[in-house]
Amino acid sequence: MYSTAKNFRTYRTEEYKGGGNTSRGRVNYKSYFHENCGEENVYYKNNGYKSRLSQFQEDDGNTAMSDIQKDLHPRHNLSTTDDNNRKVARDNKDLIHITEWRDGNHQMRNMNKNEPGCKDRTFPMTKNKGPMPKYRTPSKREIEENGQNNIYGNWFKITIPYGRKYTKTWLLNSIQSKCSVHFTPVDFHYVRSQAHFFVKNSTTAFALKNVNYKIHDENNHQVRLFVKESAAPSSEQNKLKPEEIEQLKLAMKKRFDVSQKSLNLQSFRFDQDLMSHDIDMILNRRNCMSATLTVIEENFPELLSLNLCSNKLYQLDGLADIIPKAPQIKILNLSNNELKSLRQLDKIREMKLEELWLQGNPLYNNFSNYSTYMSAILDYFPKLLCLDGKDVTHSMDVETGASEILKPSKKNHGVSEMLKNLVLQFLEQYYSIYDCGDRSRLLDAYHDEACFSLTIPCNPKELVPLSLYKYSKSNRNMKNCKDHVLLTQLLKHTKRDVVDFLRVLPKTQHDLSSFMVDICILTEKMLCFSVNGRFKEEVEATCPVILRAFTRIFIVIPASNSRLCIVNDTLTVSNACPKEIQSDVSIPARAPSSIPVPTISQEQQAMVQAFSTQSGMKFNWSLKCLEQNDWNYAVAGQNFTLLKAEGKIPKEAFQQIS
Amino acid sequence: MDFKTYVDQACRAAEEFVHIYYETMDKRRRVLPRLYLDTATLLWNGNVVTGMDGITNFFEMLPSSEFQINMLDCQPVHEQATPSQSTVLVVTSGTVKFDGSHPHYYNQNFLLTAQSTPNQTVWKIASDCFRFQDWSNN
């Protein structure tokens, strides 16, 4: 396309020189045209100027046009147009409709030398188009100059070439944040890979032009933005007259059920009241949809349920505008329309729908069975409870909006916000099961081949603190253990083993407010994050609670039904230093910590008491001694005597005799 | 490869890597960025550092360090999470003293991916997450 564009220039210059149409120019022009001829007829569809045309086209149900819209760049100077010069060709299905413009400077030429200037024409598709100008953003002066002449009130069309990658909200917010002027986007829509919207005045347009190099997406790619003049967007053209809007409001009020907060716009076009007033409510048209949404915004902002059944809708760009106007909508009926692809749902994906009706749309045929259809829909609306009247099955255990995040780059904005919420939600659910219930419910959270390992950090010169003895058997600290065979054994593999092991660990109470979460890496396939925090370990009712510090690293992958599924899990446990307790005795390296003793049986407790009395050592030290000697009282006693004789037992071990 | 082999490979890689990493960090800080992938991300006490330039600058500015490792663990990352890229999760913790500040307990975890050359497999850091832990009492 670019090479032919260059040739254009040649063509034009020659023309201006008065050279007329050289064969070279003509050939090149034609080849350019042929490249686009397939889409030629749809050029006018979403573009402002040909509103009457769109009327015919939409009515025809000529839906073939809808999905292959390619936005061909209009001429950038539309000055001095007025109704007299604009002639509209009558509908004829086989021919394309062309409107010719005439103004002093920019004549849209046809190829036929014998007919200069402006005439009504219908042409077979392969002939006749005016020259397409090379795309460029007009300068400020040009905008202002032409703006003054433009009776459409200075409308400008903003194009973001790869806009389809981003959601509407992110895109508009990013642009607004870099734009010095506040703008109100009108008729935001996507065409192929591009996003477009319109703004009203030249100052705004110029300010937006300056945003071009300033926005970067999550991957640090520049988001380009181009501004050009255009005629008014279709929702502005053919804006409904106030009396029409009044009728519209009345008709809609009749269809609004106050108790249910539901609005029934089924087959809205054939509403008796509207028809009797000659109002054509064709909701595919941006102006109609926009007027309808305005009535909703003003009269039913609390709307919960909207029925748009049987309105021949093939795109949802217009409907997307409803999101800020009626944010509570939970039920949406789009059945029996003309939606061809789930990509349309992308435009309304921010709606928090609980019930959706989509049957009777051509998109249904894209799926081989109901469950693939359902999971595809759930990707867009993870909170959905009911689809086409059937309940949606969710796995309740670790349910999150995972697949939304982990899909390639569609949502670049607020991934951080959504991601944070995703992770926090996961952690809440995980720990609620871990803390107060049956840990076997965690089976659902793990992958079949998940791995888990537990470690206790330990200063190499010291022993593992006694109080962590419950964990020490499974301690996989590679600093202490070099035996690879043992290391493999200590790694829990398969979800059965993992969960069986977790069930054996002491009962806990995690303090979510202490959690510090770091998101280490996020890719399309997985998410890795670490959690640092504290938990209380419950022992016997008699013993005070132990405070532990932990670090947990999760690697999760998306699973079906929007769940996150754990593939790798590591846990590190150590003793926490509670802020309130000040250690006023310096604790020598080998001594047990001052934290209360862990559970021992009644029998063992008695043993320790006895030993303590006999040896004169404090309870903790006696306990340690017995532990180290496998609870063999006699052997412990002997060793104690030996060590004492050698003077190896520190003074602190002994009870103070008052 | 069966699971045991994966685990073995991961253990060996982790041990060797951790040894090299902390030696380099303490004694040859200038070449530390070479252990990172160009696309690696570093998360240091909540601060994100990306790109080779960012990482190089960061380590230049970080005061000299003295690490002591008290804990090391590793797991082979499941294939489904990193298709066609052998990855190992390495977790360490211990104490560190930076020049000019008091010692801290820290936790650190790495995701290492294998870059195979004809002669050997080189493990590089795809992500590095480091945090002080000031409420633990080992």
Image (cartoon, coloured by chain):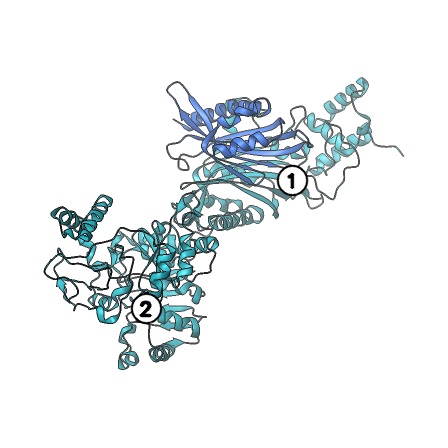
Chain colours: A cyan, B blue
- Occupied quadrant, residue B96: top right
Image: A619 above or below A133: above
Residue in front for this viewpoint, A579 or A196: A196
Q: Is residue B127 visible?
A: no
Image: A48 above or below A248: above
Q: Which numbered disc flags the more N-terminal residue, 1 or 2?
A: 2
Image: A270 above or below A176: below
Kindly identify the residue that appears in the image at 42 percent across and 29 percent down. B3
**Residue A582: x %, y % from top left:** 76, 40
Q: Chain of mark 1?
A: A
Dots 1 and 2: beta carbons under 8 Å?
Answer: no
**Residue A63: x %, y % from top left:** 22, 61
Secondary structure found at label 1: strand
Q: Is residue B6 left or right of residue A362?
A: right
Residue in front for this viewpoint, B117 or A624: B117
| Residue receiving disc 2 | A151
Q: Is residue A598 left or right of residue A413?
A: right
Q: Chain of mark 2?
A: A
Image: A619 above or below A115: above
Kindly identify the residue that appears in the image at 90 percent across and 34 percent down. A658
Can you tell which mark lies on residue A489? none
Callout count: 2
Label 1, label 2: how many angstroms apart (C-alpha)? 73 Å
Q: Residue furthest left?
A: A114
| Mark 1: amino acid | Arg
| Residue receiving disc 1 | A548
Alpha-carbon neighbours of circle 1 within 10 Å: few (<14), some, or many (≥20)? Answer: many
**Residue A616: x %, y % from top left:** 82, 29
